[in-house]
Amino acid sequence: MKCWYTIKAASDATSANISIYEEIGGWGITAQQFSEDLKALGDISHISLHVHSPGGDVFDGIAIYNLLNKHPAKITVYIDGLAASMASVIAMAGDRIVMPENALMMIHKPWGISGGNANDMRDYAELLDKVENVLIPAYARKTGKSAEVLASLLEEETWMDGRECVAQGFADELLPAVSAMARIESKRIEDFEHMPENIKGMITQPKGSTGSVVPEQNRINGIKDLFAMFGGKHDALKMQCLEDADCTPDKAKDLLLAEIGRNATPSNKNSFSHVYVGNGNIVGDGIRQGLNARLGHERAERGNPYAMMSLFEMAQASLVERGISIS
């Protein structure tokens, strides 16, 4: 199955090469798998980290930054084309950051989509503020800039090329401009308001063309959407469906219904039932607790099914709990 990162031991057995390409947290691969692969490298003294990514899941990004920042190996980061949003935060884990002159880094305020009543919206806004307060120290440790200066840069969705990054302290070494970059298949690119056109043309697919990655991502997204409302209860089946390239969302739906049916005793065997689980605000409370635990503001609760969901899956679970269709 396609993955947004690769981790490989080098031939000398004391160093490793890590590449983070595409969208962080994409294709159903989380920071947990990244952590396991990183630990599998064993005792290494140097990591070469290559980054070319539009960002991605903020909590996966924070987890990966912390994993790398605490790792005993020296880390050299190479910005191969783009380090935007959470990818720029991960890059800050490097002891040395190297950029071509025409590579770009983008930093901005964390953002997301929320649904619910006014209290829910206020809670979500407070959560985004907490996330920002986690990101700023990562930039500050590398650049030496104050929290106030960095907050201003985040507010503006700041884009910097290699030369500007070195001048501002976000990178250490400048390389000559590159003539080509790997394309990035992510709708996240469309959300950037101030992305320079020259790099957009280098990393995005030309209009009217189709890539083999897009149908695969649509298949994976469809399967993830299907399982999102079950809070991780059927993760084994979800991973089985994701890993089977021939498994479509419709096929996954049939497999999921069959699994649910094996564990359920219907009250009326002649009719289909709509399963709805609700108890006070258990979904909202579970999501909030999981997010705060990821940010380090409280201890993780054992058995919280929402703790390992992506932001997208949490949003879907919240909508489903309120009876809002996501089909």
Image (cartoon, grey):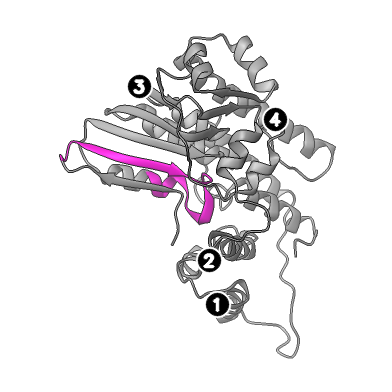
- Element under label 2? loop
Q: CA distance from mark 3 to mark 1?
A: 48 Å
Q: Nearer the viewer, residue 295 or 262?
A: 295
The residue that label 1 is drawn on is 259
Q: Is residue 286 visible?
A: no
Residue 223 is situated, as x and y percent measured from the top left of the image, at 59, 65
Contact (CB < 8 A) between labels 2 and 1? yes
- Element under label 3? loop
The residue that label 2 is drawn on is 234
Q: CA distance from mark 2 to mark 1?
A: 9 Å
The amino acid pointed to by label 1 is: Glu
Name the residue located 62 percent from the left edge and 39 percent from the top edge.
Answer: 200
The residue that label 4 is drawn on is 194
- Horizontally, residue 10 falls left or right of residue 172, namely left
Of marks 2 and 3, the one in the foreground = 3
Depicted 173 relative to depicted 145: above or below: below
Magenta span: 12-34
Contact (CB < 8 A) between labels 2 and 3? no
The amino acid pointed to by label 2 is: His
The amino acid pointed to by label 3 is: Asp
